[in-house]
Image: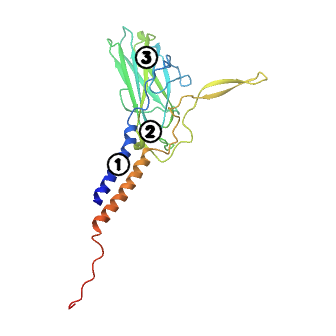
């Protein structure tokens, strides 16, 4: 009876611990319905158009243009960038490429996805995708790991014939993330997210003198940046300790016997 109670308690604790992990597997952003998705793209890192995760941005341009967007990614997220290029009615074969850079403008490798594709002459559209590695809360200075902060998306054509240069195209870009949770947690965190200045703003005082200063990116994840120390790994660690204690109690209950043995009766008594 005692062993049954111990096993029932262990199963209950395991079920309670599984609830946060199931919540972490859901997407971290939902589509935007307020019509605030951007309809243009920047032409450099400094003029990149800010994009929230879950929004679908659109932009028009010409073949040969560099199109830039920026978004925020927090620790524990695995961002996936998808882009669709709607090509002109008539064109030759051309190759498009999707690049993602972090806040230090280091190009991040795609864990999987077709980030470079070639469109045939009769193709009307081209789909590109890039899934980054999971964003870490902290990393060594020599490493190229994704870190929390601003990320830049660059979309451009890298191979086309000169006769197709300047033809009009339209693009769609969307960023979604999967929350990995404690499976990717590390011991440490950045002092500040990597959100460098992306613009210059002017300020004036009462003497009509003006000055300029860098403006930091205004985008951030829903709920703000995480502190970097909390993750569901703490929950699993605590549950593991409880289960170990219960296993010890159960083992002791099984092996202790019925109590102290009775003293032996002397012969002849």
Relative vertical location of residue 193 with respect to residue 217 in this rendering, above or below: below
Look at 40% across and 43% down and name the residue there: 183
x then y, percent, for residue 52 = 49, 26
x then y, percent, for residue 18 = 36, 44
Q: Residues within 10 Å of mark 1 (few under 14, many from 20)?
A: some
The answer to which of 2 and 210 lies nearer the viewer is 2
The mark found on residue 171 in the picture is 3
Q: Residues within 10 Å of mark 2 (few under 14, many from 20)?
A: many
x then y, percent, for residue 70 = 50, 26
The answer to whether residue 93 of the structure is visible from this angle is no
Q: Identify the residue position indicated by label 2 in the image.
A: 76
Furthest residue in direction right, as rendered: 207
Q: Mark 3 or mark 1, which has the lower sequence index?
A: 1
Q: Mark 1 or mark 2, which has the lower sequence index?
A: 1
Q: Identify the residue position indicated by label 1 in the image.
A: 14
x then y, percent, for residue 137 = 49, 41
Look at 48% across and 20% down and name the residue there: 34
Mark nearest the camera among 1 and 2 is 1
Mark nearest the camera among 2 and 3 is 2
Q: CA distance from mark 1 to mark 2?
A: 23 Å
């Amino acid at each position: 009876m005692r062993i049954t109670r111990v096993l029932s308690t262990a199963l209950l604790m395991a079920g309670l611990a599984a609830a946060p992990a199931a919540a972490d597997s859901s997407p971290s952003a939902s589509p935007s319905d307020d019509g605030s998705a951007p309809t243009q793209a920047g032409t450099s890192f400094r003029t990149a158009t800010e994009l929230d995760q879950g929004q679908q941005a659109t932009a028009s341009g010409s073949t040969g243009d560099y199109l830039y967007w920026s978004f925020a990614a927090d620790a524990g997220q695995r961002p996936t960038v998808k882009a669709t290029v709607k090509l002109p009615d008539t064109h030759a074969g051309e190759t498009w490429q999707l690049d993602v850079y972090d806040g230090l403008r280091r190009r991040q490798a795609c864990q999987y996805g077709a980030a470079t594709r070639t469109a045939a002459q009769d193709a009307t559209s081209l789909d590109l995708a890039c899934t980054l590695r999971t964003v870490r809360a902290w990393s060594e200075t020599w490493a190229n790991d994704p870190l929390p902060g601003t990320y830049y998306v660059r979309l451009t054509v890298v191979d086309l014939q000169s006769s197709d240069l300047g033809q009009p195209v339209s693009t769609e870009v969307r960023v979604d993330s999967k929350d990995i949770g404690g499976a990717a947690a590390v011991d440490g965190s950045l002092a500040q997210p990597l959100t460098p200045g992306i613009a210059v703003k002017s300020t004036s005082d009462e003497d009509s003198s003006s000055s300029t200063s860098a403006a930091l990116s205004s985008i951030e994840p829903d709920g703000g940046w995480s502190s970097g120390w909390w993750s569901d790994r703490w929950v699993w660690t605590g549950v593991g300790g409880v289960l170990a204690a219960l296993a010890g109690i159960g083992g002791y209950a099984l092996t202790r016997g019925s109590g102290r043995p009775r003293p032996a009766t002397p012969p002849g008594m």
